[in-house]
Image (spheres, rainbow, N blue to C red):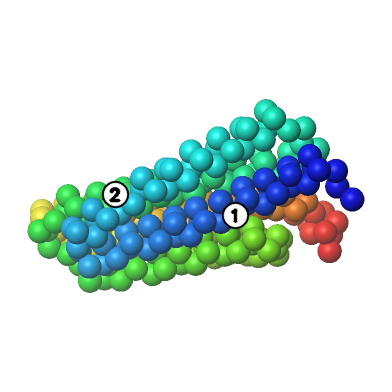
Amino acid sequence: MLRQPRRHFHQQLQELERGVQDMGVAVQDLFDLSMQALLGHDRAVCDQVVAGDDAVDAYYLQIEHHIMDLFALQTPVASDLRLLTALLHINLHLERVADMSVNIAKIVNVSWGLPTSANVLERLEEMGGVALQLLAAAMDAFERRDLELCWRLTSMDDTIDRLNRGMLAEVLDASPDKALLEWGIGMHLVSREIERVGDHAVDIGEQVAFIITGEFVEFTDASHPERRARIAGNTA
């Protein structure tokens, strides 16, 4: 049976995890809203995204302070330390995704009134949909401590990377005049922001794998495939 101080500590850890999950939902909603602003070319929705970032920042600061308090006031054992450090990283990755959502909204706002390309928007819509799935999967893996789902994030992210690599050619093909080229350059930046959202989702998966296994492995580190095989074998 846990002594009262330890029981209280673990209750605090559970509250902290719930806070991170709530932040994850808020971030997914904000990114989804930024894609709505992009596809609908809606400046009012852009304003909602920018305003919504304040709520995410509040989550970020509250969670960070909570983690620092637990480091300072408690005596975490190794597994608790692993969880706390991973939560610190996940918290940061989520905050960065919110910032990228704001960046997308701002790019949409400044491109107001410029001509658009249906093909480019279709590609961005596909990228955004995959990125949103990646975020949801990363947070689901965190909630369920699902190592296999963590590994699958990299293959999901490959789709975003492929679409992003083809974006510049798509933009140039759709840019017969300066106004459309100006819009296209902005959309190329949006493509890069979406690609980074996918990267942050994969990074969250790496932190979840660290919580589960106790060993940190970069999923995209092709130079050490034996590490992934060893970890998978140890947790099977």
Task: Give the amino acid at mark 2.
Answer: Val
Determine which of the numbered discs, if any, sits on residue 129 in the image: none
- Can you give x and y, in whole percent of width and height, for residue 224 in the image? 72, 47
- Can you give x and y, in whole percent of width and height, for residue 31 in the image? 38, 58
Compared with residue 113, is residue 86 higher up or lower down, i.e. above or below? above
| Residue wearing tag 1 | 18
Determine which of the numbered discs, if any, sits on residue 50 in the image: 2
Tell me the SS state at disc 1. Answer: helix
For the residues labelled 2 and 1, the Cα–Cα distance comes to 24 Å
Residue nearest the viewer, comparing 175 with 33: 33
Compared with residue 197, is residue 62 higher up or lower down, i.e. above or below? above
Question: Which quadrant does the C terminus fall into?
Answer: bottom right
Residue at image coords 36%, 48%: 53
Other-residue count near label 1 (Cα within 10 Å), few / some / many at <14 / 14–19 / ≥20? few
Residue nearest the viewer, comparing 145 with 67: 67
Task: Give the amino acid at mark 1.
Answer: Arg
Q: Is residue 149 left or right of residue 166?
A: right
Residue nearest the viewer, comparing 118 with 146: 146
Q: How many labels sit on residues?
A: 2
Q: Is residue 225 visible?
A: no
Tell me the SS state at disc 2. Answer: helix
**Can you name the residue that lies furthest to the top here?**
72
Using the rendered view, name the quadrant where residue 12 is placed.
Answer: top right
Using the rendered view, name the quadrant where residue 147 is placed.
Answer: bottom right
- Can you give x and y, in whole percent of width and height, for residue 46 in the image? 24, 56
Residue at image coords 74%, 44%: 8
Q: Is residue 103 visible?
A: yes
Mark toward the start of the polypeptide (2 vs 1): 1
Residue at image coords 48%, 60%: 25
